[in-house]
Image (cartoon, rainbow, N blue to C red):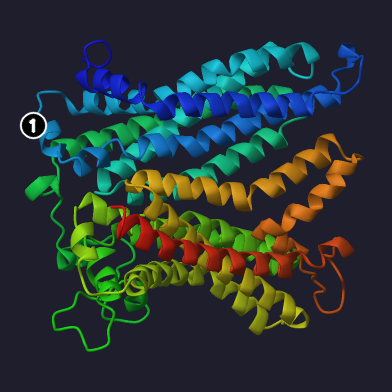
Amino acid sequence: MFLFDNPVLQRELLVNLRMNRAFVLLFAYVGLLGLVVFAAWPSQQRLDLTNSPEEAKRLVNMFFLGQYVLMSLMAPSFASGTITGEKERKTYEMLLASPMRPSAIVTGKLLASLSHLAVLVFCSLPIVMLCLPLGGVSFYEVLATYVAMAASVLTFGMISMAASSYFSRTIASEVVSYLVILPLALVGVLLYAGLEQAAGPRLVLLLVFVPAGAALVCVSLMQAISRRLIHPPDVGAEAQEVVDLEEEQREAVGMVIRSDQFPDNLFAPPKRTDFVEDGTNPIYDKEMRSELFGRGTLMLRLVIQLSMGLALFVMAVCLYIVPQNAPWYTSYVLLFNMLVGPVFSAGTITSERERETLELLLTTTLSPWQILSGKLYSSLRVSTVLTSFLVWPILLAWLLPPWTFWSDTLTVLGYLAIILVTSLTTTILAMVCSILFRRTSVSMMTAYLVVILLFALPVAVKLFADLFYPTALATVRLREFLFLSPFAAAFSLPLTLNGETVLHAGEWWRWTAPAYLVFCTLLDLVMVGTMLRLFNVRWRIAR
């Protein structure tokens, strides 16, 4: 009942693999890999294959690293909704009441969710076969890389399933999954790239240690998920998990959020027990006090603890031990906001559709600006407060002895401005997606995709061009588009560190940060105007 007669696996495969997004994703994935290989193909007419050409080795390594990163990013999007999807579709109780063993349910869900990725990897094999004759890597290294990649993706899928079993919403499960998986994926990239010149140790690592560690993690998480399915929490009406906030605070492990105390009440204020004051925006009050954390604060506590735990190490290295790496810490804060920012606004309107309360909201006497601003302010408040927890180390490194960054006050203020504008942009962008789409999961994934393309793609294209086309004129012209990325804007700010210049990339960087701030400000104004226009045209008239 685990593979051949597993009804969960059969149903998920029939539904998922026939969806339009499966074919679109396959086309985009293979097309992107083919385009990258075509662009990075060695330009020499003849290659000396006896000496393992560096161009071919760079091409193969970049292909594997790119494929690994893409798999790591896509695994949570498929596996984090395996169990929460049952809860959202009100079929969780039926699943628990089935005669299937919990391990069979978990196995079916896991294999079905990762079947998309298996198809993508299989379809990329012809591209790999094109690269092998160039030299630079042996067949055994390719085999070991695929074994380690499969073990890693299986582990990431199991981590996402574990998160899915502990939350009632796919958004919460996906965010926690990314917070755990992204550092692990980064470690894998660093190990693979660091052992590039040591073929023997890298082969042992890929064939022995990675599969063994993945098997240990998968078995442990399988047992934990199965126990949770055997002894589920209290499930009330419509398969919704019953959450008692007072009991949750008493039994919480680690950090406890107290909604009546500062600073917890900034992002999770207590539920209202009295009437709303005159002049208060009821949408904003409802979102902050009931909607965002009406089902507990487990996701919020995990996000804070995981992000702060990783930030301690990054802060110590980038702000105190090696202070010239301050832009890297700023990039970590930006990456955290790109991950967390869309979560609280991607479902602001789609959740009303899913609960079938949008028509009720539209019949109120509230103006379009009151409705949209209330939802926007509440989402922005939570994401900004969470991001500010990681901003405090920058301010402390600036204000406290030995005052390393005191001479770079303008640069520190530039870091803060970039973080603030990025927080605003990610929140508004996700809210626009929530207006355009009907499902929260689609809205959030679209917001993530647009944010990555807008903020990370310019830097990735520039690094690719510098690696394979360092002397081409187009490589120089690509620098003009770096103002779209907050990462490039952070690295463009000069660092002197008490009078000694340690970071100054050139004159062409001078306007990158100001151009980014102006661009995001204009983009935010356009998106806000678009939301108001869509509200009046699409909802009021065309609904």
Q: Quadrant of residue 187?
A: top right
- Dot 1: few (<14), some (14–19), or many (≥20) neighbours within 10 Å? few
Position in image of residue 7 (x %, y %): 20, 18
Quadrant (top left, top right, bottom left, bottom right) of the N terminus = top left
Q: Is residue 362 above or below residue 78?
A: below
Task: Identify the residue position indicated by label 1 in the image.
Answer: 97
Position in image of residue 26 (x %, y %): 51, 24
Position in image of residue 263 (x %, y %): 37, 79
Question: Which residue is at a point 82% across and 79% down the rendered structure image?
Answer: 498
- Is 89 on the left or on the right of 138, as rendered? left
* Residue furthest bottom in the image: 278
Question: Which residue is at a point 11% across and 38% down the rendered structure image?
Answer: 93
Q: Is residue 267 above or below residue 191?
A: below
Near-viewer residue (304 or 474):
474
Question: Which residue is at a point 27% across and 72% down the rendered structure image?
Answer: 283
Q: Amino acid at mark 1?
A: Ala
Q: Is residue 405 visible?
A: no
Considering the numbered disc 1 on the image, is that residue within a helix, a strand or a loop? loop
How many numbered discs?
1
Q: Is residue 38 visible?
A: yes
Near-viewer residue (476 or 404):
476
